[in-house]
Amino acid sequence: MISPVSALCAAGFAAALYAHRFWMPPCVLKEPERCRAFGRLSYFTVQTNLINFAYHTLRCLAPKHPLVGRLHPLAFATASMLTVLYYSLDHWNAQKAAGDRKWIAKGYARLPLGNHVEHGHALPLALLDALCLPRAAASASDVLWINGGDGAA
């Protein structure tokens, strides 16, 4: 049976990916140099939402799979940092607000809502998952190699 918490988390991260794809300006227009090699995957936000969508989808489809326990530290760390970093560094930044106004004027009216859908719910969903669902504990080497590998990339 699919856990409602896992389904809610997967749906939340799917909504974040949807918001980025359809409500935000294309990265090739917004930051062509930065996004030349990897496109949307150049953004930590997209990487985090993709990792967490995949993780929570795996939790829905195969909750006892060994990767669930091994990937939890990565999913939790990236999701919790996404919300904290966005609201502490980006959301209140005057330069970002000016850029957002420019893109809103160009027709991206859902951009302010998209910012919150992409970033705001990641920490609450990570906490909900961590507090409500059991999983096998990740080993110290899993945490080091999986989180460290993501951080190095």
Image (cartoon, helix red, strand yellow):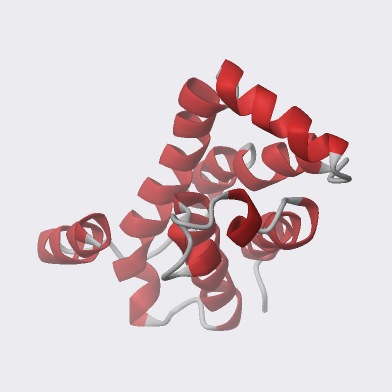
Tell me, yes or no, if residue 68 can be seen here: yes
Q: Is residue 66 above or below residue 94?
A: below
Q: Is residue 70 left or right of residue 36?
A: left
- Is residue 102 shown left or right of residue 1? right
**Along the viewing direction, whichever of 123 and 138 lies nearer the viewer:** 123
Query: In percent of the image, x 48 and y 41: which residue is there?
Result: 82
Q: Which quadrant would residue 70 be assigned to in this image?
A: bottom left
Residue name at image x 12 percent, y 59 percent: 140
Tell me the quadrant of the picture where the C terminus can be found.
Answer: bottom left
Q: Is residue 132 shown above or below 85?
A: below
Residue 137 at x, y = what percent?
27, 61
Look at the image and tell me in which quarter the N terminus lies. bottom right
Q: Position of residue 120 (x, y in %)?
A: 63, 37
The picture quadrant where one finds residue 28 is bottom right
Looking at the image, which residue is at 69% across and 64% down? 14
- The image position of residue 117, as x and y in percent, is 71, 44
Farthest residue in the left direction?
141
* Residue at (59% x, 16% y) in the render: 94
Residues 114 and 37: in front is: 37
